[in-house]
Image (tube, grey):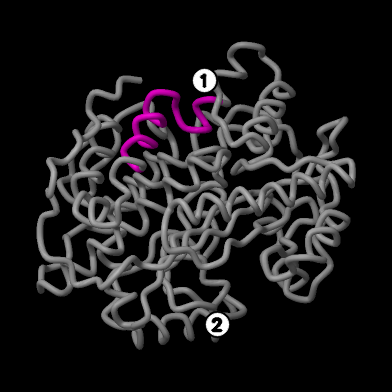
Amino acid sequence: MSTDAVTSDPAPGDNPGQSPVSGPLSMGVEEEFFVADAQTHHLADSGPLLDTVSRDGAECYSAELRPCMIESRTRICWSLAELRTELRARRDALISAAAEAGTVIVASGTYPSADWRQVGFTPQPRFDHIATAYARLAEEHLICACHVHVGVDDRDTAVEVMNRVRSWLPVLSALSASSPFWAGEATGYASYRSTIWARWPMAGMPPTLSSYADHRDRVRRLISTGTSADAGQVFWDVRPGTRYRTVEFRIADSCTTIDEAVLQAGLSRALVHQCLIEIAQGAPAPEAPSELLHAAKWRAARFGLTEKLVDPVTAELVPAAVLVNRLLDHVRGPLVEAGDWAEVTGLVRGTLHRGNSAGRQQRAFADSGSLADVVKQLITETMTAEPRR
């Protein structure tokens, strides 16, 4: 795909507006991975892998709902270079431990050839509750995501940031899409994981909130009605962090490559920074009707970067590269100030040129007609952090 639409480099000193942010915003990334047998590539138990990596970094890894999945967490980072090093270290530890256990890790929103009917649940009280309460929704929940945390200490400010970033979430989804296959079949979607999540009663695009007290009251109602067990089970696409004083972006599929995870983090942090500038200036939040937000998210999940996407603010249908370019224009100032402009725009150019993970998987399947080859490609990209050229 052409990269001509990507925003040009800023002129020296081009940093519009005075930023109210003193120093870089902190960030961290949570990555979810599938675990598969190294020989058969069938999904495998992550228990031995988790036991190994937890010896040296228990705080960095945890079990997931399904026993064939594992989550890693970076430490708090202040630069994209630091974050990249952390992501590489977390993956390298998992790759090494997996090799000892005769397994491999796979970063993808769905596992192309897996059948959810053949996978059980991790035996933990919290997961037992989810399996019982949500029945088939939980049974089909065989998906992996990438979550980005950006430090925002004040809870009311975090809610205001949520209100302002919603219109850009579909773009983040399109860039990260990595789940075109489900239960051994092509879905026609770039991010089928998004459609799986959309069925849950406490997931999806968050409502407009007036304050953190409003957020807390809504969460309480979800808990009191039995919709959620606790605040951690309110799975909105963006939310105030439940364990940390952050804004947590939950829109992205599991990022197959480290480059794609770094891109999600860089754009998410820049979005938060831009929101803080707008809040300090007293600028009104953009008007984005809920029906257009949902339409924009669906179209991003359906097509990724291959067709036109919905700009929910202008209500236009525009080429994906144009909407990505609008996002870069929107966060130019924060990216320049953080020294991230060159890296983020370079990563965007690479993604538009090579395609997101979903596009690369679809090409691999078109070339060979074999999901086994798609899985091999995912394993290679997850381990080497290099997308298929």
Q: Which of 285 and 330 is in front in this view?
A: 330
Distance between the alpha carbons at the discs numbered 1 and 2: 47 Å
Q: Position of residue 194 (x, y in %)?
A: 50, 48
- Quadrant in which residue 258 is drawn: top right
Q: What stretch is highlighted in magenta?
A: 344-360
Q: Main secondary structure of the magenta part?
A: helix
Name the residue type under label 2: Ile
Mark 1 or mark 2, whichever is nearer to me: 1
Q: Say whether residue 64 is left or right of residue 302.
A: right
User: Going 41% across and 39% down the picture, which residue do you hit?
Assistant: 175
Give percent across and percent down for residue 300: 38, 40
**Residue at the disc numbered 2:** 223
Whether residue 371 is situated above or below residue 78 in the rendered picture: above
- Per the image, the residue denoted by label 1 is 389
- Residue at x-position 44% and y-position 78%: 245
Q: In this view, does 34 lie to the left or right of 103?
A: left
